[in-house]
Image (cartoon, coloured by chain):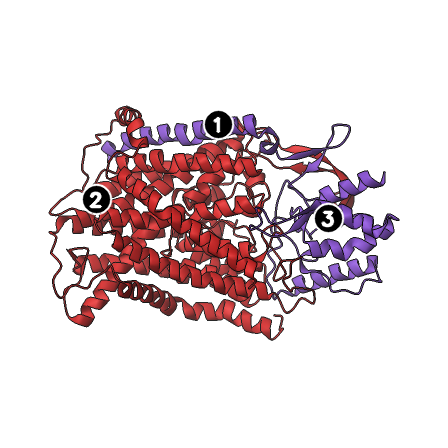
Amino acid sequence: MTAQSFLQIMLYLVVLLALVKPLGAYMARIYQDEPAGLNRWLASFEKLLYRCCGIDAKQDMRWAQYALALLVFNLLGLLAVYALQRLQAFLPLNPQNLAAVNPDSAFNTAVSFATNTNWQGYGGETTMSYLTQMLGLTVQNFLSAASGMAVLVALVRGFIRRNSDGIGNFWVDMTRSTLYILLPLSLVLAMLLVGQGVVQTTNPYQTVTLTEAVSYQQSTLDATGKPVTEIIKSQQQTLALGPAAAQIAIKQLGTNGGGFFNVNSAHPFENPTPLSNFLEMLAILLIPASLCYSFGVMVGDTRQGWVILAAMTLIFTSLVFVTVTAEQSGNPLLKVDQIASESQAGGNMEGKETRFGIVNSALWAVATTAASNGSVNAMHDSFTPLGGLVPMWLMQLGEVIFGGVGCGLYGMIVFAIVAVFIAGLMIGRTPEYLGKKIEAFEMKMAAVIILVPPLMVLGGTALALMLEVGKVAVLNNGAHGFSEVLYAFSSAGNNNGSAFGGLSANTPFYNLMLGLIMLFSRYWLMIPVLAIAGSLANKKIVPAGAGTLPTHTPLFAVLLMITVLMVGALTFVPALALGPIVEHLQMTQQVMP
Amino acid sequence: MLNYFKPAVMLLLLLTLLTGVIYPLVVTAFAHTFYADKANGSLIYDAKGQAVGSALIGQSFTQAKYFWGRASATSPYPYNAGASSGSNLGPTNPVLVTAVNARVKTLQAAEPSNKTAVPVDLVTASASGLDPHISVAAVEYQLKRVAKARNMDENKLRELVNAQTETRQWFVFGEPRINVLQLNLALDQATH
């Protein structure tokens, strides 16, 4: 790794961690309804919203009510995105006259955006009208993120409250997350991105005249119906445009990750400069990292939040170095100059952009899979085997190393509950976390939360590889083809959305399979989390005693990291051995399948 | 259930209005007021006022007198900015190795006297298929060929290249690079 790479990584971490406290404190004030500027200036607007919707903001919901409100709201959002895609041909703001999206792809995309997965089975610029992008996808970018934040806040209330039936009001948590956190941050980021060159327009695609004409072959049918290839010469280039900046801002901040264009953040109109890349990377981990501090503030002990953040940051940073080193080492099968120098980034440049080079592509890959963001600025399918293993494993860890906005932290809190349980077994005491006794019900729910994603990932991969429809979609043969399928199910089963793009997943089989898995993984985590919240809120708070395991210490951070890594390693190492690890050995031996 | 339905429908509608209509339109208005050029794709115009490309999107070059850019995996032709795409070829895929070898051969055939190793970015496909840049090493590799094809003094050409080289943004971010289209346009202008 070069000194320059090291500098860019450190700068990223320093700026990110410096923003955690101010934003975390602000978000805690928003959720605790304390004055934080914006929530006082817009208070009457917020009240007006509730009045129009017939919402009683004072209603304190039981966990089942909270879950039902969430499900109904997300279901409606899903239906709206589906309807927009199916009807876009008849709706305005469709300058390219794009046709209706076919039903299975529309279902997959609707689920994908409603569940904060943002898996892309389609190519944005050739599929979605401007209206669908704005009213459907941009909106769900906000609302799915806000749903995750709402569930987190409800869980935190479970720890704070005592002998209480309620865990808060879903409508209020939803509205405040959107209005006071996601919307203002997106507005600022979108404006900064436009300044770097991200497009934002409702004009149709632009045609320009090329300096050098391109010629290409096209197969058509002649008058008698026989296939012929004709050579077409063209001096024109069509530039796909659109209202991208607004969507990209929330796509990153809300850990969504669905690109405006097919190649996502590798597209120069989505991510034109190294600075836009830095800002977008910052946006990806900003809210998930800051929420750790908000959590600490809300439970009345900021050390509890710092411990979780420390565990996340340590795992993240070590994996960044693994990926950067793997990518910088390059591909021994290519007999070209891959040595990093002042005049080139070197390394494995297949599927990477020159302006980002190795370090920014690798750092991005790790950040987007640590958070459940799933956007790409380089093609992960073309990463070296070990460089691709890290993003895949980060998803398989359950999206808890930062994770999605809200959902990453509630996932990590569940792991913390498991960690205190394991420690409790070792010291022979009833486990407690933040003053609440962890009992059979919480452990059962935690087990469901931890077991559902691996079941979806491994079960789905196994099924796909047994069926012909699953296997024909693979682009690269051999171990890498297995990795493509495993990566897809790891992504859907953990609501990430990142892809090994070689897999032709826009088929009825994959659209339906992955769609159902995204739904299942999202809600069979959210519902048990809310159940834990309800159960905890009902309990009294036990004061810490001599046998209580302190959860604000470095020791606990280590225990938490071990728990996450052990579960992730034990579950997935066999599968990873069949894919990236075999391929790594093949590559170093210079064997091609 | 019905108790949840009305708030859900209304809240979805109002938040859609806020985040799906008002928000993007505010950003669009801002963009068109302060960055009209960038918001519409950073277009480059020639002397006659005709759009000849975007400063952010690469174009395909194959003639010896032009610098060549990254390989592009878009279909049906390279640098199709209406359908961005990477190759998605895995590192051990024989198709990748064959393609890279073929590109190396093409470069060497265009300049048989050049025996230096080919910089990796020049013979690998970019992520977007639209990468407008190549590394400084990739320009240096092609410099003699272009100078010869244009009958141009090498040092003069190098000066032109240096003027087009972008350093790391704010001296830290990204990688040093050169915009191929802009360099070639500047070349055409200088030799006319």
Label 1 resides on the chain identified as B
State the separation of the CA atoms marked 2 and 1. 37 Å
Q: Is residue A246 visible?
A: no
Q: Residue at x 74, y 44 (%)?
A: B183
Determine the colour of chain B: purple
Identify which amino acid the numbered label 3 is placed on: Asn
Q: Which mark is on residue B25?
A: 1
Is residue A137 placed above or below A550 in the rendered structure? Answer: above
Residue situated furthest right in the rendering: B151
Residue B186 is left or right of residue A517, and the answer is right
Q: Nearer the viewer, mark 2 or mark 1?
A: 1
Instruction: Residue under label 2, please give it.
Output: A64
Instruction: Residue under label 3, please give it.
Output: B162
Q: Residue at x 80, y 38 (%)?
A: B189
User: Which element type, helix, strand or loop, lies under badge 3?
Assistant: helix
Q: Quadrant of residue A223?
A: top right
State the separation of the CA atoms marked 2 and 3. 65 Å
Label 3 resides on the chain identified as B
Q: Nearer the viewer, residue A321 or B11?
A: A321
Residue A293 is left or right of residue A322, and the answer is left
Q: Residue at x 44, y 57 (%)?
A: A489
Which chain did the renderer colour red? A
Q: Is residue A321 visible?
A: yes
